[in-house]
Amino acid sequence: MTGETRRIDVALAAGGAGLLVLPWYHIRSGFWEFDWLGAFLSDDRLWPAVAQLGQGRWQLLPVLALWLVALALRLRQPSAARGKAFVVLGLAGLAWLAFEGMAIGLRGWAIPGADRLIALAGQPAWGAGAILALAMFAALFAFGLAERGVLKGDAFVLGAITALVLLVIAFVGYPLYAMFLSAFQDFRGNFTLDGVSQNIADPAIWRLDCLVGGRCGVAWRTLFLALCTASGSTLMGLVFALAATRTNTRFKAGLRLLTVLPIITPPFVIGLALIMIMGRAGFVTQGIEAITGWHLGRWIYGLPGIWLAQVLSFTPISFLVLIGVVQGVSPSMEEASQTLRSDRWRTFTKVSLPLMAPGLANAFLIGFIESMADFGNPLILGGNGGVLSTDIFFAVVGAQHNPARAAILALILLCFTLSAFLAQRFWLSGRNFSTVSGKGDGGSHARLPRGLEIAVLTLAGVWSAFTLFLYGMIFFGSFVKVWGLDNTLTLAHYHAAFGFSLAGGFTGVAWNSFWTTMGIAILAAPLTAFVGLLTAWLIVRQRFPGKALFEFAIMLSFAIPGTVIGISYVSAFNLPPLQMTGTAMILIMCFVFRNMPVGVRGGIAAMSQIDGSLDEASLMLGGSSARTLRKVILPLLRPAILAALVYSFVRAITSISAVIFLVSAQYNMATAYIVGLVENGEYGVAIAYSSVLIVVMMVVIGGFQLLVGERRIGRRDARGPATPRPVAPIKEEIAT
């Protein structure tokens, strides 16, 4: 039996199991609970597709017919003609399943007037059987292309591309489509323009009264805040990057630690600490009033407070983006400028700074998108001046309950972020910023101008001191009874959140959400890393039609704010054909496709440093693409794997903008639970919970470091440099 035939047999067997054995439709109690086995014969909702035909669901007949045709084709010898037939069958099966799944709902046809042509019974969402059938048709399409010799007949590459394209369509494109469609529907699902016409022209969104002393609409407030936050976080990120690379300060390691610390902090904790310090009852506010007599009022509530909290939160991300760019500026170019009698200031402004443009643009874009998507800080510090993310939330869960308004606000938010994303790509396109070539560059970076160096160190020092003070107050607040009123030390908050006794077990109120959060984050992190690095490998190492569009679609998901993702997932996965609301799966898939672009960019950057001749050597020695990826490429990508694991794990724990719409009573994430504590005024328990999360994330990040290990290139011993391995063992290892 050839490899091509074996692959086809596995795909057809999986499709047969989905059509003939497993439940075709969704099981509310969960497939993996296996409670459905006891009621399999008595409950027709649990029957497979072939049995559903007897219930009047004739829309499944074409699926069964296509599977039978594929079985007949299996009897033919592998050839280009058979491959073409499998491609057509795969496309037809995917297209029909997508059509019937969306056109037929719980009560029958969702298309007006279609029931006059043929009457069909309604259907719930897809279950395990339907998912296996989808996978079968996708596999037939990919393996058919391999039989036709596309991409040198590499079935693994074709299968990976097909799977990733379908996943991006399902979990990025389809939710956005569902959200856009929901803006044009009423509560009964009928098409209407009333919701769009009423909300798109709402003065509360677009008014510009602020130009004459009034109050601007929420769209312009959000845009102004995002521009200010992006500018502030990019500036401070550049300051820390210059301080860490272009000065002789002895606190470089400490600066790096301080800039990373806010990344592992739940996003609203900084806002809560600012209230406790600078709010009307904050001790800093009271101290200033006692000394100077100035009444600061409620200045922290509104755009100034949100801006300060967001810059504190997003400066570390800008620093991580910019430090590599600052280090990558070629010293020889700076030395050439000084040789031509340019002073330090002219060298920095005319040579160094322009070469940092890609990093500055990326840092600005990330700060802009993060500010647009931020939910926790505006919820805590917004006061009466909300932003788009909080208005979307209250349009869904508030008393008004206006899904059409939420969809319109989400589309406005998406337009802002996509405009920034496209503007950045347009500005950088066609410009070359390369400074590192294959030639050695042994020079040293130019020192900063004296005045600039003093300003950089002063800003970094003041910011670091303020950050240390802020985090010190956060941990202090978790050990006092009532922060600002009764500073008596106590462990009551930790006991309330994480109480434990031998008799009663886990008695703390936070244990349930804590274990749920850890489980979902640990499941989502490796999936995110795997999907991201596999995508990076396909983009860097493979050539296929539509690769540029594929890469753009992958990276586009990073430009979509978390609030928009949350709304779109609710719109898409609350009804058939894919119904996942209230489950752990919707949270996992949200985290995977929200955080995947970071793994993709990190994988592309790391893989670009690995010579393609290594892949070619492995393939020439008999290794397949899958074995080459596993034995040659992945061991050299350990830094990128670690970065993807750490980022996805941390973001799964600290995300709030999308999670707040997707959590349920059974699967309540830590960030959503802490928001509830804050809304109930339980600040001490909320801060204690956040402190525990920070410590746990630091421990798990260290565990990921030990698990992944370091990249080794060659074998080194105490007697000399790396010793190359013989070719024969390498060939044997790759072949086996």
Image: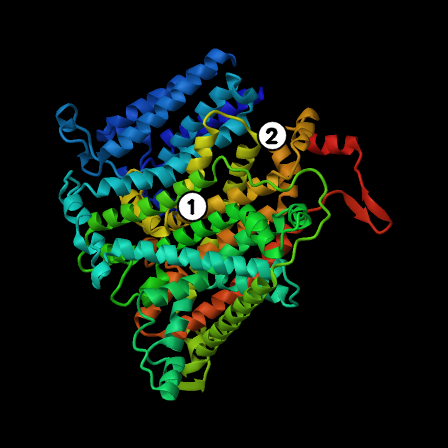
Residue type, numbered disc 2: Ser
Q: Is residue 308 left or right of residue 431?
A: left
Which scheme is used to colour this image of the protein? rainbow
Q: CA distance from mark 1 to mark 2?
A: 28 Å
Residue 168 position in % (x across, y down): 41, 37
Q: Secondary structure at mark 1?
A: helix
Q: Which label sits on residue 487?
A: none
Q: Is residue 29 visible?
A: no
In front of the other: 390 or 420? 420
In the image, is 246 to the left or to the right of 156? right
Q: Mark 1 or 2 closer to N-term?
A: 1
Instruction: Measuring from the top left, give residue 74's x and y in whole percent.
Output: 47, 17
Cβ atoms under marks 1 and 2 closer than 8 Å:
no
Element under label 2? Answer: helix
Q: Is residue 439 left or right of residue 518?
A: right
Residue lying at the far right of the rendered structure: 719
Q: Residue at x 45, y 33 (%)?
A: 550
Residue 315 visible? The answer is yes
Question: What is the x, y in percent for residue 405?
Answer: 21, 50
**Residue appearing at x 42%, y 68% in the figure:** 270
Q: Residues within 10 Å of mark 1 (few under 14, many from 20)?
A: many
Decide which of 136, 357 is in the foreground and name it: 357
- Crowding at dot 2, Cα within 10 Å, few <14 / some 14-19 / many 20+, comes out as some
Quadrant of the frame with the N terminus: top right
Residue at mark 1: 558
Kindly indicate the quadrant of the structure image that contains residue 244. Answer: bottom right
Q: Residue at x 14, y 31 (%)?
A: 112
For the residues carrying marks 1 and 2, which lies nearer the camera in this image? 1
Q: Please name whichever residue, 44 or 144, is drawn nearer the observer in this view of the structure.
A: 144
Question: At x 21% / y 39%, what residue is drawn?
Answer: 106
Q: Which mark is residue 625?
A: 2
